[in-house]
Amino acid sequence: MKIPFNKPAVLGAEFDNMADALARGHLSGDGYYTKRCHHWLEQRLGCRHALLTHSCTGALDMAAILCDLVPGDEVIMPSYTFVSTANAFVLRGAVPVFVDIRADNLNIDERLIAAAITPRTRAIAAVHYAGVACDMDAVMALASRHNLLVVEDAAQALLATYRGRNLGTIGHMGCISFHETKNLISGEGGALLINDERFAERAEVVREKGTNRSRFLRGEVDKYTWVDIGSSYLPSELVAAFLDAQFAHADEVIARRRAVWRRYHGGLGALAAAGLIELPPASYDDRQANGHLFHVLAATLATRLALAAHLKARGIHSVSHYVPLHSSPAGSKWGRVGSGMKVTDDISDRLLRLPIYFGISDAEVDAVIDAVSQFYARRNTSIA
Ligand SMILES: Cc1ncc(COP(=O)(O)O)c(C=O)c1O
């Protein structure tokens, strides 16, 4: 592909940091670089505790354990999300209850949540799609009215904000991804943000295989032992060392991704005005996105497939997602729908993601815009 969908970037001191970690003689988790990453996340995002994990999937698994669910408990979430949002809760024996998304920001439709709440509901998993915030005021108000926990799946949302607050820091817990497709990366990687002190002590234990090893390392107990359920969720120092170097360039990366996002939005505006494609809202009054993902909506599934094939023939890799979880084999086995799914089904057919990454040049973005425009110049498939 001449223009891949994603290209992971090394931004500065990644390899020096990794060599330094080796020189320090500590490569397992929770050493110098992990602590630096925790500190950066806590300061920069404004959360009580940040814990690096090996992935956002791992952070979601930890959050689900901390929710202390029993089999049959229900967790409300969008169907239009990555499998890990649901898997984490299914692993605890809980039932994902899928709710439709809003047509504007493709996030869970907060107006449909109340009707999906039952006596078994314990939590809401709020996924911030494309780094655009869910309506967190409405979600938090519902949660407090019904005594529910809120886990933010902020996998895509590092440094995006809602009413000035960083995503991942508003619910009881937040989960971040540093997978190679995300804005800041460590190959695989993630973090659990703990925003409610009640979960802090247990989170440390769950992350360290169910032991009180963290307390032992701080000299608070004289030996460590198995005290709870848990697994190995912490990444090695090599991963943390890489990530620490990425954090140093956070502002630059977000600024560039936002600029690429705006360039797409402007360059494709004429097609949207002509009714040939739909574009996401350019901006919001109360939330700021992080330029994580740029998508267009084609008129139909057939048009989306044809557009993707047209781009591919020109060396441009575009990507679609998600197969809605309610219609996936595992989702229909372990979950259930809690609302109609009209928007989810429609969006899943028509959405196409265009290449966006830190190193993409303006000329490459323009080449993608030209290729999309050329596709529509050859046919006249209107949205209407
Ligand atoms: C919404 C959402 N949740 C969870 C994940 C899982 O993240 P990870 O790959 O770090 O496990 C992703 C990854 O793309 C995601 O987009």
Image: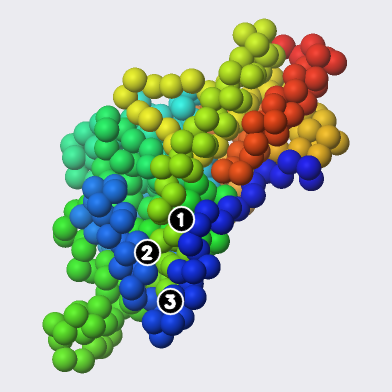
Q: Is 56 drawn above or below residue 26 in the view shown?
A: above
Q: Secondary structure at mark 2?
A: strand
Q: Looking at the picture, tell me which residue is in the foreground, 87 or 151.
A: 151
Mark 2 or 3, nearer chain start: 3
Q: CA distance from mark 2 to mark 1?
A: 14 Å
Residue named by callout 1: 246
- Residue 22 on image: x %, y %: 46, 80
Report crowding for label 2: few under 14, some 14 to 19, many 20 or more residues within 10 A (C-alpha). Answer: many
Q: Nearer the viewer, mark 2 or mark 3?
A: 3
Q: Looking at the picture, tell me which residue is in the foreground, 216 or 255.
A: 255
What is the three-letter code of the residue carrying label 2?
Leu
Report crowding for label 1: few under 14, some 14 to 19, many 20 or more residues within 10 A (C-alpha). Answer: many
Q: Are marks 3 and 1 in contact (CB under 8 Å)?
A: no
- Residue 117 on image: x %, y %: 31, 39
Residue 69 occupies which quadrant of the picture? bottom left
- Residue 78 on image: x %, y %: 45, 39
- Residue 222 on image: x %, y %: 16, 91
Task: Please give left or right for residue 98 compared with residue 6 in the image.
Answer: left
Q: Residue at x 34, y 58 (%)?
A: 192
| Quarter of the N terminus within the rendering | top right
Q: Looking at the picture, tell me which residue is in the foreground, 322 or 200.
A: 200
Q: Is the C-beta of the residue carrying label 3 under 8 Å from the nearest atom of ligand 1?
A: no
Q: Residue at x 16, y 58 (%)?
A: 197
Q: Looking at the picture, tell me which residue is in the foreground, 254 or 227.
A: 254
Q: CA distance from mark 2 to mark 3?
A: 16 Å
What is the three-letter code of the residue carrying label 3?
Ala
Q: Is the C-beta of the residue carrying label 2 under 8 Å from the nearest atom of ligand 1?
A: no
Residue named by callout 2: 52
Task: Please give left or right for residue 50 compared with residue 378 in the image.
Answer: left
Residue named by callout 3: 21
Task: Please give left or right for residue 223 compared with residue 239 in the image.
Answer: left
